Amino acid sequence: MIKRSLLLTLCGFFVLSIQAQLPEDALRASNTFGAGTAREQAIGGAMGSIGGDLSANFVNPAGLGFYKTGDLILSPGYSFGHTNTNYLSTYSKNPSVSNFLLGTTGAVYGRGDETSSLAVSLAVNQSANYNGHISYQGSNNYSSGAEAYAEEFTASGLSVDDVFRDPGISYGTRMALYTYLIDTSSGPQGPVIVQPRNVLNAGGSLGQTTDITTSGGITEYAIGVAGSTKDKWYIGVSVGIPVINFQQTTQYTEKDLSGNKNNDFDSYTYTEYYSSKGVGVNGRIGLIFRPNLNWRIGWTVTTPTFYNITDRVSANMVTNTEGYAGKRMVNSDTLDQIAFAGNSFQYDLQSAWKMLISGSYVFPGQVTEGTMGFITADIEYVANKSARFSFPLDANGNQPDNTYFEPLNNTVKSYYNNTFNFRLGGEYKVDEIAYRLGGSYSMDPYSSAQLSANRMTFSGGVGYRKKGIIIDLTYVEAISNDVNFPYRLGEKENIYSTVKQYTGNIILSFGIKF
């Protein structure tokens, strides 16, 4: 069984391999931005208090209480975009990526009168889309990714033979030793030689290239129940079952740019194939208070999603150390045979819990034959620091010792901040045609002042309602800023690439009332 060495977290650095769990896994599962219905997305996703939309299942289930009839909704969509990267002052525009997506789709059945209502709903939504392609390159005369492998090997205190037999050491480090990318000069416990350092010590530079392709997403199924009393208090609950399916292929290459064929290093390429699949469960409870026809105030708490996840990793490395050991290659199957280990790892992940407050102003406050509309805003708190990794219960229902995960859970606490998401939107309706605008902003989740990430969306759309026919069309432009580290070192300042992602989503919702 493959495990990421605890030494990585204890020492505060991560080798290039993403084998097993990293703090990024918790963030990826916690910070989800669903496709929604076209109406919900057009108003910036601010559905916390306005209600009357199928997407309330995934935002504030109390909003289902506004239904006194039934809706059947289908929300197909299309996503496209690209990323720009900047690594060591080298700018790159990455290839475009596109895919079909599924916004909130399902049915809601409601009944009621002027004083009370009751509704039940079943819906599915793509709450995360992981399709993407990031690539960056640059010339580095300061550090090498091989130094991360050397650091892990040194910190392990193991001999070379023992490292090969220990599945707790990352694939990258074991492969670096196998191909003589790193080696010892005076026996098993001697000082580590990192071949690319020969280039850097001589004043040369390394050409570094990172290419990451990701795919998959999170599809969440939810059932919600809501009701109202006196058309003032609305309460609802929903239970969600998210299914996560994430794949990532990472290829990292370093090449000697000096042109010297006698310095014991020409190049190495490490390629890793990683998948993460699992199922979880979460719950939402929400309230909406409507003191009069004009104002609505909403509140929602979303529990953590309790996932059971299985990660699988395979990898290979090709290294050319010229006259030192020539060209050598190895794959993970060879190392698994030496260590008598498999390539999968099962664990539980508790994602961040969330709380949302919302307010809406509706004008003129009642359904009219002419014009009406609303302005609405959400503020959502995301407790990123609360994410936790643990082992699943054993066959007898007992909780195993989770000491293994303590350093990683402590890193999640220190690496991330709790954050806020802000959403704002509005709708103006003239007879059967509605015009909508919205936007959102998500704060930087990193605790380090040197790192910066955020996400903004701008959206607009139109809708049609007449004789039980529902048609909504929306365009959403999302701009995300993030960072990506090709490798992490404990003894040097780390370098990283900035990543700016532009994504366009087109969502069409259509349905009927019954």
Image (tube, rainbow, N blue to C red):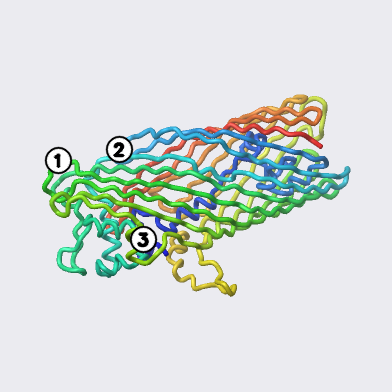
The image quadrant that residue 261 belongs to is: top left
The image quadrant that residue 373 belongs to is: top right
Query: Residue 32 location in percent, x, y?
Result: 56, 47
Q: Is residue 43 left or right of residue 132?
A: right
The image quadrant that residue 408 belongs to is: bottom left
User: In terms of sequence position, does the residue under pointer 2 or pointer 3 come before the other?
Assistant: 3
Q: Is residue 4 left or right of residue 382?
A: left
* Badge 1 amino acid: Gly
Q: Is residue 269 left or right of residue 42?
A: left
Q: What quarter of the picture does the C terminus occupy?
A: top right
Task: Give neighbour class at mark 2: few <14, some 14-19, many 20+ (Cα, 10 Å).
Answer: few
User: Residue 12 shows which numbered tag?
Assistant: 3
Query: Residue 3 location in percent, x, y?
Result: 41, 63
* Badge 3 amino acid: Gly
Task: Return the residue at label 2.
Answer: 89
- 132 and 376: which is toward the camera: 132
How far apart marks 2 and 3 lie (CA) works out to: 26 Å
**Residue at image location 26% in from the left, 56% down from the top:** 176
User: Residue 259 shows which numbered tag?
Assistant: 1
**Residue at image location 74% in from the left, 47% down from the top:** 121
How far apart marks 3 and 1 lie (CA) works out to: 35 Å
Task: Give neighbour class at mark 3: few <14, some 14-19, many 20+ (Cα, 10 Å).
Answer: some
- 489 and 339: which is toward the camera: 339
Can residue 414 be seen in the rendering of this structure? no
Can residue 457 be seen in the rendering of this structure? yes
Query: Residue 239 location in percent, x, y?
Result: 68, 54
* Badge 2 amino acid: Ser
User: In terms of sequence position, does the residue under pointer 3 or pointer 1 come before the other?
Assistant: 3
**In the rendered view, would you say 452 is above or below 514?**
below
